[in-house]
Amino acid sequence: MMMSQFQSLLHSYGDDVQDKAQTLLQIITKFNAAYCQTIEGTARNIETTELCGGARICYIFHETFGRTLDSIHPLAGLTQMDILTAIRNATGPRPALFVPEVSFELLVKRQIRRLEEPSLRCIELVHEEMQRIIQFCGTEVQQEMLRFPKLHEKIIDVVTQLLRRRLPPTNSMVENLVAIELAYINTKHPDFRPDASLASTLVADDEKARNIPVRRIHGNAPSTYEHEQPKNMTRFMGEQGLPRPALPLEPAASANKDGGANNQNWFSSLIAGPRAETTAPSKEQSRESSPSATPTHQQLALSAFDTIINPDQGVEVGKVPTPPEGGILSPQKPVNLLPEVPMQQTRKLTERESKDCEVIERLIKTYFYIVRKSIQDKVPKAIMHFLVNHVKDNLQSELVKHLYRTEEIDTFLSESPEIAQRRKEAAEMLKALQNANVIIGEIRETHMW
């Protein structure tokens, strides 16, 4: 019983190295086979306490990465005011008759870019797991690693460098997958075409409903339409003897009306001068009410410029400073008199704006789901091709290239002093047990005679 235990212990420590080159190749081959089997799930000693190797990579692809992409909402970080602002910016100075396609592309690209970060994080997780596989390569390889610690360190270094060199091309490929989706928004995609057609139909129906004429009946008068010009409506109402609508008077006519000219109509107030019986205003009042008394943009700019030059001396509004002799005023800093455009407008959207936002939101959702499905399928494939399979196919050649060197074989295969001492003790104990067994056998034979 004790002999079998020491025999297995001595076998685990290994025999003395006779041919170092052959022993090194055997260790490299064992490590490569154990590493690939751990990834493929065909190892002899399968871990039962936790996921490792290829099973953990599969979990990263379909659970961690998949759930992360599913948790990204197509409209996250996108408000209706953002959509409305994009629509307005896409139309420029022209009011939009239809929802511009440029705004949809701008917004959907903004959402697609959010898929890049989880994809790169998936590469990092797979890289960490492949680095971790070195510790789960099987008991046989682990014993060899303990026996030759310098060889163990060198193997870990070679595998680490190989994995590190494969990170840039893998990251580049995944970034290109997202860039490909951003480069061309395929609105003719088979899965996107039904929603695009439905959205255009909704817009067309909305335009038709908005242009339907509404009839208005005035007694026995013929029917008219609300969308007719006010000129036609005024002429028709004049012909039918209906009261004319009250039109706003000019400021001069309003002043004459307040002064007692109630019988003068609005047309005469525009072309006729002030009546003779009307009391002439004083010079001060006429100066205040005259259009020239109102400060213009040029006067305001000059006043602001003079205020910048002479901050101690105030300039009255409306008073134009005299330019220097033989020259013109040229301010160093332009004065912006335009009102600032508010960045965020908190107001209730109109019916037209709400429908336009709904159309854009629906298109963004549909196209985002298409791209997300494509990224969720292609990123694991890219990682398997550029990282996992490449390491599996080139691991043994990389180990032979960096380890199988004549001048370094003795260094790599130098045993640990502890292992050598334990193997020596185990060999001596096994030899002692064998001798004891022989002596016991001789005593039995002698007693029988």
Image (tube, rainbow, N blue to C red):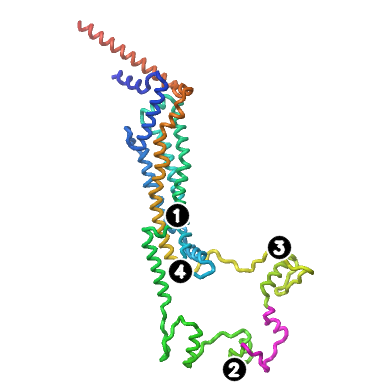
Q: Position of residue 335 (x, y in %)?
A: 67, 66
Earlier in the chain: of badge 1 and badge 4, it is: 4
- Mark 2, residues whose alpha carbon is within 10 Å: few (<14), some, or many (≥20)? few
Region of the chain picked out in magenta, as a range: 270-293
**Most distant residue in the right direction:** 325
Q: For mark 4, what is the residue?
A: 98
Q: Name which residue lies at 39% across and 69% down.
A: 202
Amino acid type at circle 3 is: Gln
Q: Which image quadrant is residue 135 in?
A: top left
The disc placed on residue 186 is none
Q: For mark 2, what is the residue?
A: 263
Query: For numbered disc 4, what is the local secondary structure?
Result: loop
- Mark 3, residues whose alpha carbon is within 10 Å: few (<14), some, or many (≥20)? few
> Is residue 286 one of those drawn in magenta?
yes
In space, the residues marked 1 and 4 are separated at their CA atoms by 24 Å
In space, the residues marked 2 and 4 are separated at their CA atoms by 50 Å
Amino acid type at circle 1 is: Ile
In space, the residues marked 3 and 4 are separated at their CA atoms by 44 Å
Earlier in the chain: of badge 2 and badge 4, it is: 4
Earlier in the chain: of badge 1 and badge 3, it is: 1
In space, the residues marked 2 and 3 are separated at their CA atoms by 55 Å
Query: For numbered disc 1, what is the local secondary structure?
Result: helix
The disc placed on residue 332 is 3
Q: For mark 1, what is the residue?
A: 112
